[in-house]
Amino acid sequence: MRDPVVRGDGSTSIFWKLPLKPTDIQNGDYFHKVVDCQYACPAHTPVPEYIRLIAQGRYTDAYMINWVANVFPGVLGRTCDRPCEPACRRGRVEEQPVAICRLKRVAADNKSDVAERLPKVSVAPTGKKVALIGGGPASLTVARDLALCGHELHLFDEHSTAGGMMRCEIPSFRLPEEVLNEEVDYILDMGVQKHFNTLVTSLKGVLEQGYDAVFVGTGAPKGRDLPDLPGREEGAANIHVGLSWLANVAFGHVESIGRRVLVLGGGNTAMDCCRTARRLGGADVKVVVRSPFAEMKASPWEKEDAQHEGIPILDNHVPIDFVIESGKLVGMRFDRVHAIYDGAKRKLVSTGQPPVLLECDDVLIAIGQENSFPWIERDIGIEFDKWDLPALDEVTLQSSLPKVFFGGDAAFGPKNIITAVAQAHQAAVSMHLFLSGEDVRVRPSPGVSLVSQKMGIHEWIYDNIVINDERYVVPQVEVEAALSDRLLEVELGYEHAEALREALRCLNCDAQTVFTAERCIECDACVDVCPVDCINFLENDEEEALRQNLRIPAANLTQSLYVSGDLPNQTGRIMVKDENVCLHCGLCAERCPTAAWDMQKFLYTVTHAGQ
Amino acid sequence: MSYFRPGFRHPELPKNDLGYTKQQYEGAISTLCAGCGHDSISAAIVQSVFELSIAPHQVAKLSGIGCSSKTPTYFLSNSHGFNSVHGRMPSVATGANLANRDMIYIGVSGDGDSASIGMGQFAHVVRRNLNMMYVVMNNGCYGLTKGQDSATADVGSRSKAGSVNRFEPIDLASVALQLGATFVARSFSGDKEQLVPLIKAALSHSGFALIDVVSPCVTFNNNPGSTKAYDYVRQHMQTTSLVDFVPMAEEITTAYGEGESRGVTMHDGSVIQLHKLRTEWNPEDRQSALNALAESRERGEVLTGLLYVERDSRELHETINSTRTPLRTLTEKELCPGSSALETINNSLR
Ligand SMILES: Cc1cc2nc3c(=O)[nH]c(=O)nc-3n(C[C@H](O)[C@H](O)[C@H](O)COP(=O)(O)OP(=O)(O)OC[C@H]3O[C@@H](n4cnc5c(N)ncnc54)[C@H](O)[C@@H]3O)c2cc1C
Ligand SMILES: Cc1ncc(C[n+]2csc(CCOP(=O)(O)OP(=O)(O)O)c2C)c(N)n1
Ligand code: SF4
Ligand code: SF4
Ligand code: SF4
Ligand SMILES: [Mg+2]
């Protein structure tokens, strides 16, 4: 295959095209990427594996798989940002992905007592002392992983107990306290020494106490304010920073709010603020956001829930000032804008209309949060970058002071719980290597296995029937009841029957189509039967051309092509499968007369500290 | 036997001129053995009818008995169908066609169904030039009754059980040519690049169009020593030419050197474009096709591709001057034209 190219000066060159090499399926990364949800999960939770267990009613087993991977299944099954769902393959063949997150909750709600299943510390104490600063999901995850390695752990938090923002910020109507306490206690009961009600004011001081390693999991605790907006000072009594206000509500320091409330901001914090305000006496609560509705940072489901509770969202409104009368806040003025785009850049431009006055009794500012490390001395060897964030190794999470590690929101700015957990697992791996005197850059490989699912001629160990059901809606309590009780959980969770059907929507993307070229007789049976036209037999070429030449061009470049080596017939063709919308239905393997296709379950597990 | 097919299809499935995707042309999930050549032919029929933008309800599928004759269940579920008696598909097709010439007739048969019990019927439907596509899914055996040698098995071909066939084979393509068939082609189930354009050409042909498709029986006749096995056919396959089917109103884009390429314009204006023609062979010369077949047989090759086409063929209706109107829409007025019409007829016979 060569294409002569004539250059401007008349000379000709011949370029050899580079046909694709056969896919190396021995390399775990290939099949890992096919399991879209697990790949997208920062902690790489084996999603299809636990969903199958839910379908079988094995809730406790499903729970434990989650607990090992993401530490807080009950919490995450209610609150996770679910990066897995937009990645879910089902969302590419129909409207909605599988409700991965809410199925996790089903496992947590229906499990039996797991006390017996939790790992026990079985190694001798190493004599190493570790300080964990901040008691959020990041520190707790490090604690769980390192406790099993035999290190002595000291957990510090300014509050009376652990949980971090899961406790102070996420309202109880989304995450009941009992659910959080249960999962936090599993970890605290693993022999962690608790230093609560302790605000750490000096890292130097901590280091002087002889810790062998320190983990900083203090989050991004500073809520952004609008200090320069006219009227901010005069109205201070009725203007609150959302982050601290939510914490005050959580700890019972604040129990009411004015009748008319404006919430500024378009992220999830704004959504929690407005819904909490509705429960504390705010009858007329409005969210006011600068950007267009579609570009708000809040997840679509959070916006829906807020609107469902009768909270209007006014977009394209930029605040001008707080309006103060007789020394008291009476409202806010906004300039109406519209967005103008220059490529990816967006500018909000005034429409020129007169400002809008929105009357109110209280304002909640929920426009973002920041890291803040006033307690870390800048002369102890920890470098900070130009954004005043610690300079870290992205893989090991080690700072420039070798014994100090970061994770969670403290590491790279505010994200979410699952990211905090994933980073903490990696930090724990690093810390254990460091404490064992080993190189933190030599990381343990993930666990991978591939097992045939064949049970009979056309029977598989997994349920390969693809059902057509649309995504099930999670039932909720009546709005009226919800608004009358701040602690009442809004979502009721799936019933068993719905959970089963929802679980069956999962396509089992971990049941991999494994191709053995030596067996293929090119009968085309697999090509003909595949309901989504994934499989092709054609001449090899460069990737771009090959993608174009498939029966249905492989336009989704984020999805891999599975490419075989030469086939025994010497027809000059190879097998190319576009992984994009494969339903993992197993029909190719059922119709193959020579078992050149087999369905094999691929299991990928992240290796945690000490494993 | 797989019994379930998911309801989802590729979200980017192309649509044809009628706005349908290939899904509207599918049939039930096949119950044939995994890897049976017949399933590939079904898939080729689905693809061809879809690409020709034929409305499924305008098609009638007819078949006899055999694994091959079961396949109409596995394609074009939205079309009409009649699964008839062993070897009797041609009679049923003839009746249906005479009753309604507006439909497109796809007959599916096997080598047993056509070359043994149905040989007489086959001969007559060919010589009458009934307007239909007649596909023989030719596996050299009686698949459905567990693999006995059929009349198309080659001399010396070895069965799965080890016995060697001693009888001369019937070559349906040659027989059809001799009986005056107006479109004859041969293909291989494992070569859709050739089979699909041939099916499209056959469907566009006005008159009888035979495609003899070698279609390995994976279960009873895909063993070493069989001349109808996947690997044997691949190794011995030759072609009369490469075939492209260019529907009416579409531009011919492939360029070939002079003498290498030839276009045959069909009754409806579409063109069968042939490239890299075999020497001494002329697609519109019956004798050269017979010669080419005989020479290939001599050399132990399986000659595939278009063998013969007669563009201005007179199909049965034209020969017998029957009515253009489907019988079901004839009213009493046309059927009982009255005594004066009878008088005219009687007078013409005096
Ligand atoms: C309103 C709101 C709603 C949210 N909702 C969700 C959600 O639904 N889903 C989701 O995934 N994420 C959500 N998040 C984000 C999520 O809570 C955080 O990303 C996550 O908790 C970060 O975990 P972490 O362990 O890094 O830190 P944190 O959870 O912030 O924990 C840090 C802890 O350290 C303590 N601390 C800080 N400094 C010191 C010090 N110097 N001494 C002692 N203790 C200290 C803090 O008080 C806190 O308890 C939300 C955030 C907010 C603000
Ligand atoms: C009248 C009659 N005689 C015999 C049979 C038994 N029979 C069923 S299928 C078949 C042969 C089918 O062979 P073929 O047409 O080649 O189909 P294949 O199964 O090979 O595709 C025979 C003899 C029958 N069904 N009816
Ligand atoms: S499992 Fe096989 S038949 Fe099913 S969609 Fe995937 S490639 Fe196609
Ligand atoms: S069904 Fe099996 S033998 Fe046939 S083409 Fe597919 S992989 Fe090859
Ligand atoms: S017996 Fe042979 S012809 Fe019949 S379905 Fe099986 S493979 Fe096909
Ligand atoms: Mg047969």
Image (cartoon, grey):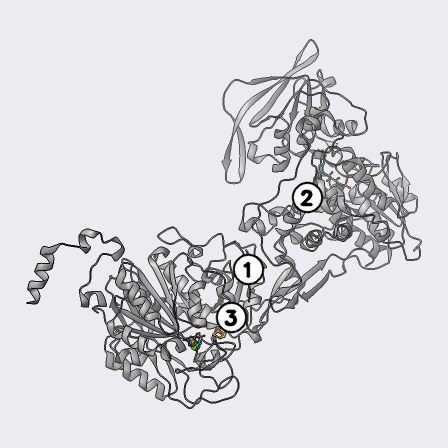
Up the image or down, B285 lies above or below A85; here it is: below
Same chain? Circles 1 and 2: no
| 3D distance between C-alphas at marks 1 and 2 | 29 Å
The image position of residue B87, as x and y in percent, is 37, 74
Amino acid bearing label 1: Phe
Q: Which residue is mark 1?
A: B4
Judged by depth in the image, the label closer to the viewer, 3 or 1, is 1
Point out the quarter of the image occupied by ligand 2. Answer: bottom left
B68 to the left or right of A414: left
How many residues crowd mark 2 within 10 Å: few (<14), some (14–19), many (20+)?
A: many
Residue at which label 2 appears: A102
Mark 1: few/some/many CA within 10 Å (<14, 14-19, 20+): some
Q: Tell me the kind of residue under disc 2.
A: Arg
| Mark nearer the N terminus (3 vs 2) | 2
**SS class, disc 1:** loop
Query: Residue sitting at 43 percent across and 80 percent down?
Result: B140
Residue where numbered disc 3 is placed: A574
The numbered mark 1 sits on a residue in which chain?
B
Q: Does residue A381 appear in this view?
A: no
Q: Which quadrant, please, contains the N terminus of chain A? A: bottom left
- Where residue A537 appears, as percent x and y from the top left, is 49, 68
The picture places residue B170, in percent across and down from the top left corner, at 35, 83
Image-based side of A109 in relation to B142, left or right:
right
**Dot 3: what SS?**
strand
x then y, percent, for residue A328: 70, 12
Picture quarter containing residue A464? bottom right
Amino acid type, label 3: Ile
